[in-house]
Amino acid sequence: MTQTFDFIVVGAGMVGAAIANGLAARGHHIALIDQGTAPQFSAQDDPDIRVSALSAGSERYLRELGAWGDILAMAATPYRRLAVWEAPEHPVAQLLPARPPRTTFSASDLKTPHLGHIVENRVTQKALWDLASRQPTVTLYSGAGIQSQADTGDQITATLENGQTVTGRLLIGADGAGSRVRQLAGIGVSRDQYQQQALVASVRYQGTPADITWQAFHSSGPRAFLPLHSAGQAHAGESWASLVWYDDPAVLRELKALSEQDFMARVRAGFPEELPDLTAVAARASFPIARQHAHHYFQGRVVLVGDAAHTINPLAGQGVNLGFQDARCLQLLLDDARRQGLDPAEPQLLAQYEAQRRPANRRMMLTMDAFYHLFSNHRTPLWALRNLGLGLAQGLPFARNQVARYAMGIDESLPVPVQALLRRLPSRWREAG
Ligand SMILES: Cc1cc2nc3c(=O)[nH]c(=O)nc-3n(C[C@H](O)[C@H](O)[C@H](O)COP(=O)(O)OP(=O)(O)OC[C@H]3O[C@@H](n4cnc5c(N)ncnc54)[C@H](O)[C@@H]3O)c2cc1C
């Protein structure tokens, strides 16, 4: 028998589960569908290999939804400082006596208790699934993906791989970068595969949980340290961290194939001296990275959010933060539409969503691309330019703090001079879809 809902949300990842909860809290009836099964968490387990730096803006949204308390109760590591610098590998840098300039953002400069939290994806997802299971207006369908969708004019029906069918007024596609919903709706994408991939490693190190996250730019790609929680009594005095090594796929294949001891030795040699003393590597995985943008955010009774609509270079950890902004924006518009008695698939309404989110997502894509192209090469004028930029950023606390407020999701737009700079980028970088 087909059940009828207000909204069908396909994909209960972090973004889909968030919007489902947001809509359910306002009394809408939701079918929340995921091909996977309920996420698990145990404090004794090694951390999830997938972690995200959640901005203050995302924290605010998750708090509004009522999931933040559960996230904190499981595991979330606040960071109060964020540092970026260029590894001194350029031949000119080797001749200079001084250390290359660094830009450090600190919570105390921004008058805020922290800059963000590093949270395992399974923790955020579990808190949102648990919340959804407590909402009387959410029905969770897990363990079977969507197979087809049929738009019948005034409603849309989704058929799952196990034959179940559900009907609603609008289907929200939150099923990630390879979105089946997007394909079934016939929405194309612009896609650019970066030459670099990302190798992520869950490691243990000697010491208490760090309050800093940092990233050193090498011409082959950045190397980053993201602090996680204490490793507990089983490994007293140690803490977990997530390391990210961006490089050519061939180099990452070689790194993945090394024994744990050899891998640690390569990491010690390849990472900056700021890396704490590693004691173990629990897991390693590599991810292809691509910039992808859907040609449209909606089609008929289908609308896209999160990675289904856009993916960006993860070097500044903004993907899910943008996805949460999509979710919040769409949720508010849909709620407003109901108050006005409008059809939630009204094209003008969904166009309003796209008009608000596409430029913001595109701006972030451009910013990440500018960083990628600026740092991923060895040419001396660009080396001088980026070091000048990092030096200036450190020397101009006002501008630096404005950019940090944007990255943290406190401000929704970049400072005007940065926007003007982005408009001057070559068109190849501007045409992000
Ligand atoms: C190396 C790396 C590091 C990153 N670091 C950060 C970071 O620090 N900060 C940050 O903000 N972002 C980061 N990101 C990006 C972030 O992980 C993504 O933006 C985020 O996971 C997107 O969430 P989502 O819910 O839109 O999609 P997903 O997380 O992909 O979730 C999609 C959900 O849909 C389900 N699904 C898929 N297909 C179907 C189907 N056919 N039927 C039903 N269900 C389906 C899946 O099971 C899944 O639960 C990083 C990404 C990478 C690769």
Image (spheres, rainbow, N blue to C red):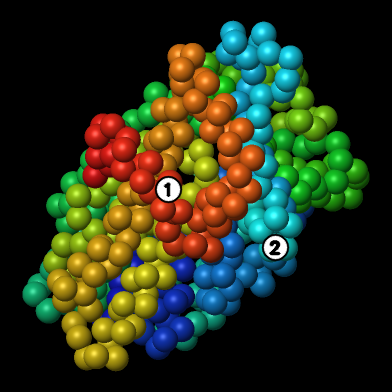
Note whether 363 is above or below 352 in the view shown.
above
Q: Is residue 141 visible?
A: no
Q: Residue at x 24, y 34 (%)?
A: 427
Label 2, residues with CA under 10 Å away: few <14, some 14-19, many ≥20: few
Residue reaching furthest to the left: 153
User: Quarter of the image holding residue 77?
Assistant: bottom right
**How far is mark 2 from mark 1, CA to CA?**
23 Å
Left or right: where 188 falls relative to 6: left
Left or right: where 22 falls relative to 55: left
Left or right: where 403 falls relative to 149: right
Residue 343 in percent (x, y) is at 18, 82
Q: Nearer the viewer, residue 352 or 231?
A: 352
User: Quarter of the image holding residue 387?
Assistant: top right
Q: Residue at x 51, y 20 (%)?
A: 383
Residue corresponding to mark 1: 417
Residue 102 in percent (x, y) is at 66, 33
Q: Secondary structure at mark 2?
A: loop
Residue corresponding to mark 2: 111
Between label 2 and label 1, give the one nearer the viewer. 1
Q: Secondary structure at mark 1?
A: helix
Note whether 282 is above or below 257 in the view shown.
below
Residue 370 in percent (x, y) is at 41, 35
Amino acid type, label 2 = Lys
Q: Residue at x 63, y 22 (%)?
A: 87
